[in-house]
Image (cartoon, rainbow, N blue to C red):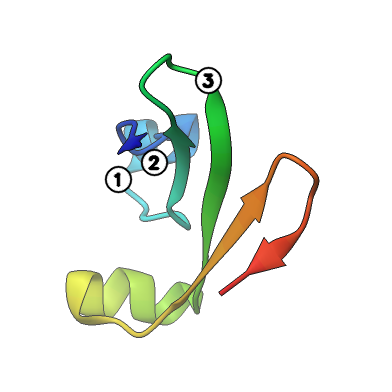
């Protein structure tokens, strides 16, 4: 399984404003197996960058969530 590059949103590209991270995790055939997304505070994303606290949620193709 591999994680594709971070999905970058237009807002982040245009403004440099850090948005919540999102990832597509796919198998060797390139098929999506999981979708991962970050839950974090806006202020922490802007002020603390990579040192911020966050929760990563992982959803499978059946919409079941794990942490």
Element under disc 2: helix
Q: Pointer 1: what residue?
A: 16
In three-dimensional space, the C-alpha distance between marks 1 and 3, rounded to whole angstroms, equals 30 Å
Q: Position of residue 66 (x, y in %)?
A: 63, 69
Mark before the other along the chain sequence, 1 or 3? 1
Element under disc 3: loop
Q: Pointer 2: what residue?
A: 12
Q: Residue drawn 49% across and 76% down? A: 40
In three-dimensional space, the C-alpha distance between marks 1 and 2, rounded to whole angstroms, equals 5 Å
Mark before the other along the chain sequence, 3 or 2? 2
Q: Quadrant of residue 54?
A: bottom left
Q: Residues within 10 Å of mark 1 (few under 14, many from 20)?
A: few
Q: Residues within 10 Å of mark 3 (few under 14, many from 20)?
A: few
Foreground residue, 59 or 51?
A: 59
Q: Pointer 3: what residue?
A: 31
In three-dimensional space, the C-alpha distance between marks 3 and 2, rounded to whole angstroms, equals 26 Å
Foreground residue, 27 or 67?
A: 27
Residue furthest to the top: 29
- Vertical placement of residue 54 versus 2, above or below: below
* Dot 1 and dot 3 residues touching (CB under 8 Å): no
- Vertical placement of residue 50 versus 7, above or below: below
Q: Position of residue 16 (x, y in %)?
A: 30, 45
Which of the image's four quarters has the N terminus?
top left
Q: Residue drawn 42% across and 14% down? A: 29
């Amino acid at each position: 399984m591999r994680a594709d590059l971070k999905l970058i949103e237009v807002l982040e590209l245009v403004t440099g404003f850090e948005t919540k991270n999102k990832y597509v995790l796919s198998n060797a055939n390139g098929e999506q197996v999981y979708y991962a997304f970050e839950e974090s505070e806006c202020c922490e994303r802007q002020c603390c960058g990579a040192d911020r606290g966050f929760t990563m949620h992982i959803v499978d193709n059946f919409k079941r969530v794990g942490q």
